Image (cartoon, rainbow, N blue to C red):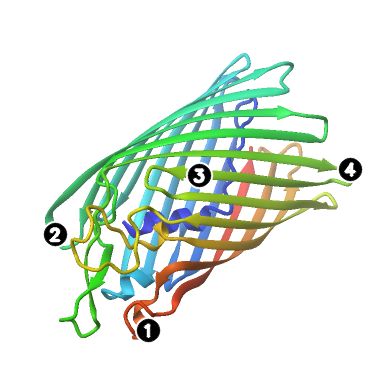
Amino acid sequence: MAVTKYALLATLLFVSVTTTGAVLPEDRSDAMYHSYSGDGVTIDGPSILLRKKVGNTVSFSANYYVDTISGASIDVRAQASEYQEERTEATLGADFLHNKTLVNVSFTNSSENDFEANSYHLGISQDFFGDLTTLSMSYSRGEDEVRRRGDLNFLEEAQRQKFGVGLTQVISKNWIMGFNVENVSDQGYLNNPYRAIRYVDDDSARGFAFTTEIYPNTRVSNAFSINTNYYLPYRASIYGDVRYYSDTWGIEASNLKLGYIHTFGDAWIIDAHVRFYQQEQANFYQDLFARADEFTYMARDKELSTYSGVSGGIGITYQWAFSQSFFLEKSTFNIEYDYMQFDYDNFRDVTTGEAVGEEALFGFSASVIRAYVSIWY
C-alpha cells in the first residue's frame, strides 16, 4: 500500500493537467522509465502508453504502469524492517469527438499485494467563442479494498468521488490562462493499516510505544488553481501555477510552481522549473500523544503534519522527424530530473535515541528521474 503514496510524490512535479480544445489526441506511443529515491526508499519501474484514432471521431488509449518499491521510510524504520512490494496499474480509455465537444471515458485498476483499487472517469469539454474558450467538467469514482500483510482476516473498503470544473481562456495570441476547481469526497477506511501513533509509555525502554492510527471515516476536500502560459517572441515561454487546498480534516495547503521553456534550434527544448509547497497539519495530528486512547481520532503520519517543501528541476527534449515516406511521423527523447527538499515542523525523528519529545525535527531530500521516448504515427 505504501507504493501508491510514493508514486504520487514521484510524479507530482512532472504532471501538469491542462484543459484542451475539441481535438482528438494524436496517435502516439510512449515508453518510460521512472525512478524515485528519498527517505530511505527507492521506487522505479516502466510505463507504456498507446493512443490510436479510429476515423475522425474516436480515439482509444491504453496505459500500463509499474512501481517497485524497496527500502524503509522513517515511519517504517521506527517500527519494523525494510520491505519490498510492487504496484501495477492499467488504464483503458476512449475519446469521442462531436463538433466542438470532446468526451473522455476511462477505467483504471491499481493492484498491490495488500491494496486493490478500481476507478472510473468521465470528462467533457466544450469550445466556445471561436475556440478561444474551453469549458471542461469531469467526474471520477473509485472503489478501494485495503488489506494488511500477515493478517488474512483484515479487509476494509473505501469509496472516493471527484468532481472537477475547468475554464481555459485564450487572452491574446501569446497568453493563455486556466482556472480549475476540484471537489473530492472520501468515505470508508481512510488510514494506512501500517502507520501508528506514538504515546508516552514509562514502562517502555524508549519512553514511548506505538499503536495503530485512528482516522475519521469521511473526508471532503476542495482545491482551486490558476495556471498561465505566456509565449515569448524568441521561441520560448514562461508559465506558472498556483493551487490552494483545504479539507474537513483541517489541512490547508498552498502550492506555487514557476517555469521557463526555451527552444534551441529545430530539435532541442529545455524546461527549467521551481516549486514551493506549504501545508498546515490535520486537526487530529500529533507527534506524541499522552496515552494510547487520548482522543477519538489520532494520527502521526508525517504527511498530515505541518511541513514545507521546495524543489527544482530541468527537462530536456530532443525531437527528430522521419522522412515523409516513412510510416512514422516524428519522435522525441525526453529526460527530466527533479531534486526535492522537505522539512517538517512538528514531526520528530524517533530513531535518534534522544529524550522523548525532544528528538530532532525530521527532514529529507529526494531525487526523481524520468526518461521516455515518444513516437507519433
Q: Secondary structure at mark 3?
A: strand
Q: Which mark is residue 151?
A: 2
Q: Amino acid at mark 2?
A: Asp
Q: Badge 4 is on which residue? A: 233
Mark closer to the observer (1, 2): 1
Residues tagged 4 and 1 counted as in contact (Cβ below 8 A) = no
Q: Amino acid at mark 3?
A: Tyr
Q: Please state, as top left, top right, bottom left or bottom right, where the N terminus lies in the image.
A: bottom left
Q: CA distance from mark 4 to mark 1?
A: 54 Å
Q: CA distance from mark 3 to mark 4?
A: 35 Å
Residue in the image at 76% along x and 37% along y: 324
Q: Badge 1 is on which residue? A: 352
Residue closest to the far left:
153
Residue in the image at 45% along x and 32% along y: 93
Q: Earlier in the sequence, mark 4 or mark 1?
A: 4
The answer to whether one can see residue 315 in this image is yes
Residue closest to the far right:
233
Mark closer to the observer (3, 4): 3
Q: Amino acid at mark 4?
A: Pro
Left or right: where 178 falls relative to 139: right
Q: Amino acid at mark 1?
A: Thr
